[in-house]
């Protein structure tokens, strides 16, 4: 038997399937029986998704002056 | 089978770059500035720092061209160089005062139950992400994480480098990377919880 504290502490290993098989089963049983940990697992997984989505939507063209200034700096550095 | 066109474009660009061709250099900078600036911005909150790191990245890339391995993807190689440049810039910056990670982690009572577990997050990611406020909120909460933990979260979950690679970059053990990642995610979840929990019976 594990506590909610144990479940949450080793949650990353559980999700990455890095727990020994027997431990993995104990964790499966805990999440099946514990609505709080089941909810925690869902929000933890969603947190990872949100982090990725929120950070990667910044991709787009750089402001126009960025490549121009870069090229100037690169030319200057290479002419040394 | 990869489509031939992007491959041959990249191959032609590489030939030009290796020959020190000015046109190829310009093309590289114009093609990749946007993408790589997005990377450095993720690590460096300050726009000037992000642009400095971007410049460092391109200069590094031009110097390292002789070591570019045939058969590698230019975009992956550049991405790594940009991540490295951002990390190096991060090291030169003064640390802002930050909350210790312990203050941001969930707490437990004697018997191992969580304190104030609270209601579920009802709406799925796809739905909440349609709102611009969600994206702004998540980025702001990531910014609030202490730097050591934020960096690992960015490298593992956002830049998608693997544990061993992150361990090498940060000069810590793979186990330290795993622990920091889990704590970062837990802390981020706690910071987001008040905004997503559904306080309805």
Image (spheres, coloured by chain):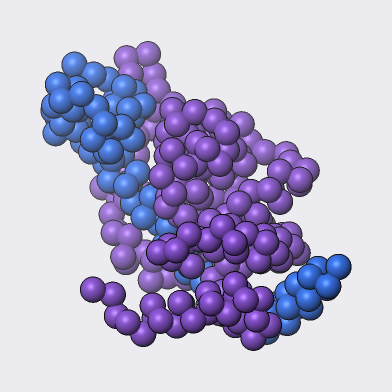
Chain colours: A blue, B purple
Give residue A10's quadrant in the image: top left
The residue located at (49%, 41%) in the rendering is B166
Which residue is the extreme one toward the front? B19
Residue nearest the observer in this picture, B54 or A37 = B54
Name the residue furthest top: B110
Front-most of residues B50 and A77: A77
How many numbered callouts?
0
Find the residue positioned furthest to the right. A80
Residue displayed at 76% across by 46% down: B93
Quarter of the image for residue B43 reads: bottom right
Question: In the image, B73: left or right of B87?
Answer: left
Q: What residue sits 73% from the left and 74% below the top?
A: A70
**Is B97 placed above or below B38 here?**
above
Can see residue A16?
Answer: yes
Residue A21 drawn at (x, y percent): 15, 25
Residue A74 image position (x, y, % from top left): 75, 72
Residue B110 picture location, percent across and down: 37, 13
Looking at the image, residue A11 lies above or below residue B60: above
Residue A13, quarter of the rendered image: top left
Q: Is residue B133 visible?
A: no
Q: Position of residue B21 (x, y in %)?
A: 65, 81
| Left/right of residue A19 with respect to residue B76 in the rendered view | left
Q: Residue at x 81, y 68 (%)?
A: A77
Q: Nearer the viewer, residue B16 or B189?
A: B16
Image quarter hosting the N terminus of chain B: bottom left
């Amino acid at each position: 038997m594990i506590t909610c504290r144990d479940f949450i502490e080793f949650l990353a290993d559980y999700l990455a399937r890095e727990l020994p098989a027997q431990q993995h089963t104990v964790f499966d049983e805990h999440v099946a029986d514990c609505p709080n940990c089941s909810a925690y697992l869902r929000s933890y997984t969603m947190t990872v998704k949100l982090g990725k989505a929120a950070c990667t939507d910044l991709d787009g063209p750089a402001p126009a002056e960025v490549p121009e200034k870069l090229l100037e700096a690169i030319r200057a550095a290479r002419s040394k | 089978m990869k489509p031939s066109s992007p491959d041959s474009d990249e191959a032609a660009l590489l030939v030009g770059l290796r020959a020190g061709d000015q046109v190829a250099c310009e093309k590289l900078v114009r093609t990749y500035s946007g993408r790589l600036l997005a990377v450095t911005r993720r690590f460096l909150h300050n726009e000037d720092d992000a642009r400095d790191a971007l410049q460092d990245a391109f200069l590094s890339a031009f110097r390292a061209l002789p070591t570019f391995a045939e058969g590698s993807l230019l975009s992956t190689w550049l991405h790594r160089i940009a991540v490295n440049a951002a990390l190096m810039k991060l090291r030169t910056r003064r640390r802002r005062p930050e909350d210790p990670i312990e203050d941001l982690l969930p707490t437990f009572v004697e018997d191992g139950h969580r304190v104030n577990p609270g209601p579920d997050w009802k709406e799925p990611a796809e739905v909440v992400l349609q709102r611009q406020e969600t994206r702004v909120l998540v980025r702001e909460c990531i910014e609030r994480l202490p730097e050591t933990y934020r960096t690992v979260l960015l490298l593992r979950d956002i830049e998608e480098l693997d544990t061993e690679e992150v361990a090498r970059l940060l000069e810590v053990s793979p186990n330290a990377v795993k622990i920091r990642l889990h704590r970062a995610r837990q802390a981020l979840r706690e910071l987001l919880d008040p905004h997503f929990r559904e306080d309805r019976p």
